[in-house]
Image (cartoon, coloured by chain):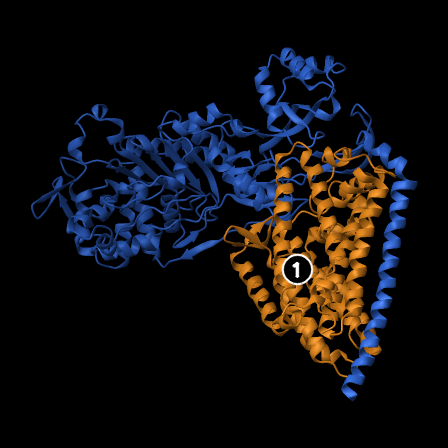
Amino acid sequence: MSVEFNDIILEKNLNRKIRFSVFFVTLIFLFIFSRLVYLQILKGGKYNQLSTNNRIRVTKLPAPRGIIYSKDRQILVDNKPSFDLNLIPQDTADIQKVLTDISELLSIDRDLLDTRVKKKRGRPPFEPITLKKELTWKEMSLVLSRKMDLQGITIDVVPKRLYCFGSFAPHVFGFLGEINKKELRRQKERKYDIGDLVGKYGLEKLGEKYLHGQKGGLQTEVDVYGNRQKVLAEISPVSGDNVVISIVPEVQKKAEELLKDKTGTIVAMDPVSGEILALANAPQFDSNLFARGIDVENWQELIENPYHPLLNRAIQSQQPPGSVFKIVTIIAALEEKLIDPGFKVFCPGHYKLGIRNFDCWKRGGHGWVDMRQSLVESCDVYFYTIALKLGVETIYKYAERLGFGVQTGIELEDEKSGLLPSPKWKKKRYGTEWQRGETLNISIGQGFLLATPIQIALVYSGVVNRGILPKPRIVLEVEGERHGRKMYPFEKIREYSISRETCDFITDALVGVVSDPKGTGSLARIRGVSVAGKTGTAQVASKKTQSENEEDTPWHLRDHAWFAAYAPAEKPEIVVCVLIEHGGSGGSVAAPIAREVLKSYLSLKEK
Amino acid sequence: MFDRRLVLNFDIVLLISVLLVAFLGVLNLKSIGSSSAEMHSVFFYKQIYWILISLGFLFVIININYLSIARYAYYLHLISLVLLVLVLFYGKTIFGSQRWLYIGGFTLQPSELAKITLILALAKFYSENISPRPYTIKDLFFPFLILLTTFIPIYLQPDLGTAGLLFIIFFSMVLFININKKSIYYFLSLFVVLLPCFWFFLKDYQKKRIMTFFNPELDPLNAGYQIIQSKIAVGSGGLIGKGFKMGTQSQLRFLPEQHTDFVFSVWAEEWGFLGCIFLLLLYFFIIYRGLSIAYNCRSFFGSFVAVGVTFLIFSQFIINVFMTVGLFPVVGVPLPFFSYGGSSLLSCMIGIAFLININMRKFK
């Protein structure tokens, strides 16, 4: 009884509240009612006028991308104004007539204009349609002189990317391209619109977050013809952040010149700081082709070129390192104290293992060689002999320690890791046991072993640095309004232990390679500077397929020419690795190139 | 076996008003679709299809006594919660937020479903814990927990519009239970204190939208522009409007998100003040019917559900209309029954189904 009584009280209470909420709801409806009276009845005339020509418009103002500087503040990548011919459909009474006029005036194919207009069908009529990008001065004056007749036509300034030195370090800078649907959808905030250019490769892509600016815009009131009457609000665009990179333009230019008409790559880095001083590839391309979106023909040409200009050989070309690898075998021998530097081997020009013959590159043989000479003259037989004493596991251990078989971690994308084979790897990959002959091959940098030029440069830097591997880096600093200032300082990949004696021995021997009368790298000699270097001539096919005369060998079967060097030997400031694919012998082809690169950097330093 | 009273108390007028709003909404979509963009004409047909589907749901629901549904209220809400968690892991991402779940060709937005099941679960709790002693803050711990467990996954999607609506539903239902005055004051002051804290949970662009509302000059290119264009559209409609398919603001696509957020602007531009008043009267009637069903219902559960559903529809209505006439920041809340969108239509229609259901069985 009492429960029901309570229920009645509670129900009364609830119903009182419901009655009140009817009152509350009515009030709100009355409020909306009065708002509508205000907007539609009292202010209706004013709003109607505003809507007739849709007088209020928004135009986006593009923001310039960040500038890329070298360390000494030379501008490497900039923006320059370019002029686009746009049509605002809403502002013209007769689109067809305007298109015909434009097509005659600038002699553009009429169908092309039609397809550009059609592509934008369904877009709001106040949105400009670009009829022609990058007008010339002549075209611009033609259009401006007829501006009165060309209803709805505007010329707008758009910042265009400019790679100041033309075709210069394209694999570092990369290129731009139109944003695709996936990228548009993925953005969390609306920063990009259809048709915007974004970095697609290289630093332009990696630094997109910093380099791209923040668009601004204008809210304007226009008259019936679309002419701007009043700017109601303006948001200025903010340019992207500037980036300072380590590439030294003089050295880079020199390196690119040296590679002309060749297929290959040059990497130069500061062995202490890890800064990349030059990274050149040949053949290369011109980033400017992409500055406002590349056209089909140019793209087709790039991807169909048999020498793959888009390939960043410095970090993607995986090749047998040949004799530049030999320092690894020596370091393993010295560090494990298995071989004494005084140990001598007689080289008759070949080495017999079972029934197989392993040739030295010098047919006649080197005679008696000690450890230093084995590097200076690059005697293969010496390495065959000590390889079996070391065993493959020891060589593997040191190669891994020095930096083979893993990516260096440079900022650029798609770096390859090379290949450092081991018995375990071979078993897994081929299902067969490791052969003793393969240990011989690996000791001279042949066989399954593959390395990238950047790896070689890093390995040599590590030896120079007594075991400290610096992370190769290109971006040194980002600075701008949007993200403030950010430094990218030296980073250590890792450190391994190596004795001073071993390092000194290697440097002494490598100086010998260049300066000894019998040294294989004598073409790298620079007057007044002690250069340390190691040649490498990597076989890509067995000797039998090559003819006696190099000229007769098909290009793709010729040897790769390597040269890895550093200078000055007492206190190295630069490490260079040169790879000329199918270029011939390292000593005659790669060494003189390395010399020129070293010279250009050292002479710059002197100044 | 068949009770005549069920047929007698079937609130056909409410259903007709709702269908009328939906019909006008479809008409409006047709007008939007007539502007050249092909993608918009699809909305018209899809919406008709969704109206039919949600009507199907409506007829199924009214045939089950709502009091038997009450028994499963918690389980139903649990299903919603599971779906909400699933959507976080397997959801389809559209414009940066994961709200949709793919089930056999359909995309389902579990957050819409959760609104209804939350109302059911809260109504069940309040109706089962009736005592003459008024509720205090402490007694609200469990319902608040239900709210939070629903709120968090929706907030994470992120779908702040719906997450906010859940709070509104919760607070409006609290106002109808027997709660002591002191607790209400506590609650209100807590709310006032918490409101600024919410600010820190907002994303940058959301903060910007709210700031833009108070000062349209802050973002004249996006949200500020939308508010202006919407106001121009509504205002330029005048007394009798520009006529069907004649709205320049909408046809020329100056209005953003015409088919969802700014449907009312399109309607106001083309049908003018008179058209707006007609639409407002329909909504007023729907809300009024909802409240009177709550009033006439003899079970607490029924009353609470009716109140919850009514305020769910009412709050969405206010937010959307206020937004289009420049009285509320631009947040993506659809206009019930009128905006394009299957899940929203479905959840509102299920709400109406409960209202009709409760009214049919009010004397039991």
Q: Is residue A470 left or right of residue A535?
A: right
Q: Is residue A558 left or right of residue B41?
A: left
- Where is the N terminus of chain A found, in terms of image quarters? bottom right
Q: Is residue A116 left or right of residue B215?
A: left
Does the rendering let one see residue B332?
Answer: yes
Q: Residue furthest left?
A: A355
Tell me where residue A83 appears, x and y as whole percent.
66, 23
> Residue placed at 67% from the left, 37% from the top?
B33
Tell me where residue B50 appears, x and y as whole percent.
62, 49
In the picture, residue B190 is in which quadrant? bottom right
Q: In this structure image, what is the colour of chain A? A: blue
Tag 1, which secondary structure? helix
Above or below for A330 versus A528 = below
Q: Nearer the viewer, residue A459 or A39?
A: A39
Tell me where residue A342 appears, x and y as whole percent.
20, 52
> Residue placed at 78% from the left, 57% from the top?
B286
Q: Is residue B280 left or right of residue A153?
A: right
Q: Which residue is identified by label 1?
A: B350
Above or below for A562 versus A27 = above
Q: Residue furthest right?
A: A42
> Residue placed at 20% from the left, 46% from the top?
A441
Tell me where residue A428 appears, x and y as whole percent.
24, 54
Does the rendering let one see residue A259?
Answer: no
Q: Nearer the viewer, residue A257 or A237?
A: A237
In the picture, residue B245 is in which quadrant? top right
Inspect the image, locate mark 1, and give the three-letter code of the amino acid beneath it: Ile
Above or below for B272 versus A118 = below
Q: Residues within 10 Å of mark 1 (few under 14, many from 20)?
A: many
Q: In this structure image, what is the colour of chain B? A: orange
Chain assignment, label 1: B
Q: Nearer the viewer, residue A280 or A42?
A: A42
